[in-house]
Amino acid sequence: MRELRVASFHVRATAAQSARWKQASEAEGFASVGAWVACAVDSYLKARARAGAPIPLAWRRGRFAVLLEDREAMVYGHVSPPFAAFRGDGTGRQRRYANVYRLVYLPTRRVLATLRYFHDCKALAADLARRWVREEIPGSVEA
């Protein structure tokens, strides 16, 4: 059986928004406004994906594990689960002036692509996330 991971968010609303959200969640049979908001946000992201818009990914700096040519290593780079990117070669050596970035799928720790620029990694990750939401690519993006 898969373990269910839960995240919590705090959402601010005006009194008018709060009243509308409570009415909408009750009308649609949700136990709480939070459950209704989660469903509404998922629907919004799926609509963006159907429209061809990229899925917004929030990138930050951090360390992560990656499977390299000969071993597994911890590297430092940019992370936006379920993706990450680092500058370096296939052996894990990170050089400040390395010529390529490697896009990594974090659940498997495998390198998906080697690209010239970090913005290309971000664009490919957003496109893959959009395609997974639209179910054009088998499998799912897991955080």
Image: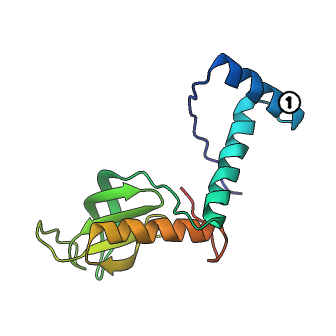
Query: Residue at point 53% right, 59% down?
Result: 55
Q: Is residue 87 left or right of residue 127?
A: left
Query: Residue at point 69% right, 38% down?
Result: 37
Colour pattern of the rendering:
rainbow
In the image shown, does 25 or 106 lie closer to the viewer?
25
Q: Is residue 113 left or right of residue 34?
A: left
In the image shown, does 3 or 127 lie closer to the viewer?
127
Above or below, comparing residue 99 to residue 73 in the picture: below
Q: Is residue 29 left or right of residue 78?
A: right
Location of residue 67 in the rendering, given as x and y in whole percent from the top left corner:
35, 74
Query: Residue at point 82% right, 27% down?
Result: 23
Location of residue 104 in the rendering, given as x and y in whole percent from the top left corner:
39, 70
SS at badge 1: helix
Q: Amino acid at mark 1?
A: Glu
Query: Residue at point 22% right, 78% down?
Result: 91
In the image shown, does 71 or 63 lie closer to the viewer?
63
Badge 1 crowding class, 10 Å Cα cut-off, few under 14, some 14 to 19, many 20 or more, is some
Location of residue 93 in the rendering, given as x and y in whole percent from the top left corner:
17, 72
- Circle count: 1
Extreme bottom residue here?
69
Above or below, comparing residue 42 to residue 127 in the picture: above
The residue pinned by badge 1 equals: 26
Extreme top residue here?
15
| Residue 109 in sight here | no
Above or below, comparing residue 82 to residue 135 in the picture: above
Q: For residue 9, which quarter of the picture?
A: top right
> Which quarter of the rendered picture does the N terminus lie within?
bottom right
